[in-house]
């Protein structure tokens, strides 16, 4: 066969090329992806916020200092007088005070615990978001990997077909010169040759674009000219179809719904009284002539302790508005979860149907390829016996290459659908934990 040297040349090129697998790209993306790093930072931010929410369970202790200069404009008054919120100072010029204050929320009907629960759910959601982002990156890698694989195969087979098309065009030109072939047939062959050259250039462009996309996603510097993508493992998907409830997407909705319920519960509890314990310890010092002497005069003055109750009786219908908003948001989340489950089920069904159809197509195409190869062997025998012409032999060779390309594309597509289904049914527990 005349195109054997081309096959040898292409094989030597592939041997010199860098072989890369889909698993290598996935591992590199997982290790270096900035998108996953951002998701991880988001999780840490929520964990830090959870720590600040926990701080509300502890007493609040504060220390305050005040220093004042007073000048009495009424010589007849020497004591401090309070009228409402107004305090008229005494005649002492320099006064200092230190106050140690403690405040502790004793009981708020579980409102603080609900706030902690909401923050915990937010941390869980952020972790699941990272898992979903990981699956999304894998899917983008898979899409570009398969595009590059198909373009790679098309380049190889179309280059072989180009050689045969040129040979066929030359044969038809000779036959036309001998008056045994029409000008239209020669022209048609020239058009086919131009078309196949265009297909090769388009395949090269598609391959380069896909490889560049793989570089961006995987953080591996791949050459657009000497990279060889290895075949996907078509048997990676285990025939275990998971329910939607086990997917990261479903678990995210579950956590968000629980979080929204906790927000509704907290809003109700915020309408109830807050019982707090407070205590103050005061030191006081003063001097009529010198501020430093007044500061040195600081000594314990008094302390107090007590209970307080705060109850918001009316807030301008704020509760009704907030309650309505939260319930509508909860309703929306439930509808989104139902929609996602429906889409998940139909996508699963579609992928399964595709896999079954592609398996049948592969089988039929393999049988057709075997027949085409037998036909080529018979044609070559008849050619040596002079019973068929060169045009028929080259045409059968082209048919064999076309069927090989079709079968190769169907194998790639079958492996793609299998891996896509596996990613679709990837559990949250299978995501990488940082």
Image (cartoon, helix red, strand yellow):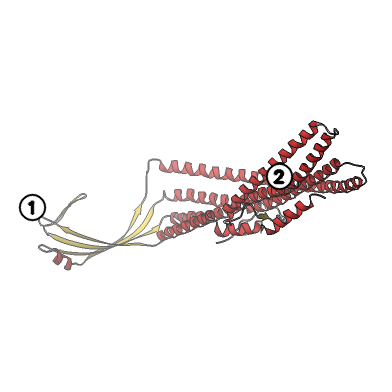
Give the Cα distance between marks 1 and 2. Answer: 92 Å
In the image, residue 59 above or below residue 192: below
Report x, y in % for residue 138: 62, 53
Report x, y in % for residue 366: 82, 49
Residue situated in front as seen by the camera: 185 or 142 = 185
Residue that extends furthest to the front in the rendered view of this protein: 177
Residue that extends furthest to the left in the rendered view of this protein: 75
Report x, y in % for residue 224: 62, 52
Residue situated in front as seen by the camera: 260 or 249 = 249
Residue situated in front as seen by the camera: 129 or 120 = 129
Left or right of 127 in this view: 104: left
In the image, residue 186 above or below residue 256: above
Going 76% across and 45% down the picture, which residue do you hit?
Answer: 163
Left or right of 339 in this view: 161: right
Left or right of 1 in this view: 37: left
**Is residue 250 among the parts visible in the rendering?**
no
* Image quarter of the C terminus: bottom right
Exactly how many numbered labels are in the figure?
Answer: 2
Residue occupied by mark 1: 74
Callout 2: 10 Å neighbours few (<14), some, many (20+)?
some
Q: Are marks 1 and 2 in contact (CB under 8 Å)?
A: no
Q: Secondary structure under badge 2?
A: helix
Label placed on residue 163: none
Mark 1 vs mark 2: in front: 2
**Is residue 156 among the parts visible in the rendering?**
yes
Q: Earlier in the sequence, mark 1 or mark 2?
A: 1
Q: Secondary structure under badge 1?
A: loop
Residue occupied by mark 2: 350
Report x, y in % for residue 58: 39, 62
Callout 1: 10 Å neighbours few (<14), some, many (20+)?
few
């Amino acid at each position: 066969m005349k195109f054997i040297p081309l096959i040898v040349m292409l094989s030597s090129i592939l041997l010199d090329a860098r072989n890369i697998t889909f698993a290598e790209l996935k591992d590199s993306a997982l290790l270096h992806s900035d998108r996953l790093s951002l998701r991880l930072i988001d999780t840490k931010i929520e964990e830090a916020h959870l720590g600040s929410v926990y701080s509300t369970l502890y007493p609040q202790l504060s220390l305050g200092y005040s220093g004042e200069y007073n000048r009495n404009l009424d010589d007849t008054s020497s004591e401090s007088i309070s009228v409402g919120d107004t305090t008229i100072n005494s005649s002492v010029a320099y006064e200092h005070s230190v106050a140690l204050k403690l405040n502790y929320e004793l009981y708020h009907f579980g409102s603080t615990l609900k706030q902690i629960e909401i923050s915990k759910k937010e941390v869980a959601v952020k972790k699941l978001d990272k898992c979903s982002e990981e699956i999304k990156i894998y899917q983008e890698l898979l899409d570009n990997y398969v595009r590059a694989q198909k373009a790679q195969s098309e380049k190889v087979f179309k280059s072989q077909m180009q050689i045969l098309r040129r040979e066929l065009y030359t044969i038809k030109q000779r036959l036309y010169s001998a008056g045994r072939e029409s000008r239209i047939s020669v022209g048609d062959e020239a058009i086919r040759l131009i078309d196949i050259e265009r297909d090769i250039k388009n395949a090269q462009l598609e391959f380069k674009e896909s490889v560049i996309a793989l570089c961006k996603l995987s953080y591996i510097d791949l050459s657009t000219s000497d990279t060889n993508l290895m075949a996907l493992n078509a048997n990676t998907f285990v025939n275990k179809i998971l329910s939607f409830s086990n997917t990261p997407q479903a678990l995210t909705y579950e956590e968000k719904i629980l979080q929204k319920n906790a927000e509704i519960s907290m809003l109700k509890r915020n309408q109830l009284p807050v019982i707090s314990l407070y205590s103050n310890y005061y030191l006081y010092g003063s001097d009529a002539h010198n501020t430093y002497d007044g500061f040195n005069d600081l000594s314990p003055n008094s302390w107090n302790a007590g209970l307080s109750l705060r109850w918001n009786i009316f807030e301008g219908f704020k509760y009704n508005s907030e309650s309505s908003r939260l319930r509508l948001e909860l309703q929306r989340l439930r509808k989104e979860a139902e929609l996602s489950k429906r889409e998940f089920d139909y996508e699963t069904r579609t992928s399964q149907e595709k896999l079954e159809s592609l398996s049948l197509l592969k089988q039929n195409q393999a049988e057709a390829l075997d027949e085409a190869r037998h036909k080529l062997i018979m044609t070559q025998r008849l050619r040596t016996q002079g019973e068929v012409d060169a045009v028929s032999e080259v045409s059968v060779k082209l048919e064999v290459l076309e069927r090989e390309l079709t079968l190769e594309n169907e194998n790639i597509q079958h492996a793609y659908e299998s891996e896509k289904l596996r990613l679709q049914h990837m559990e949250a527990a299978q995501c990488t934990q940082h």
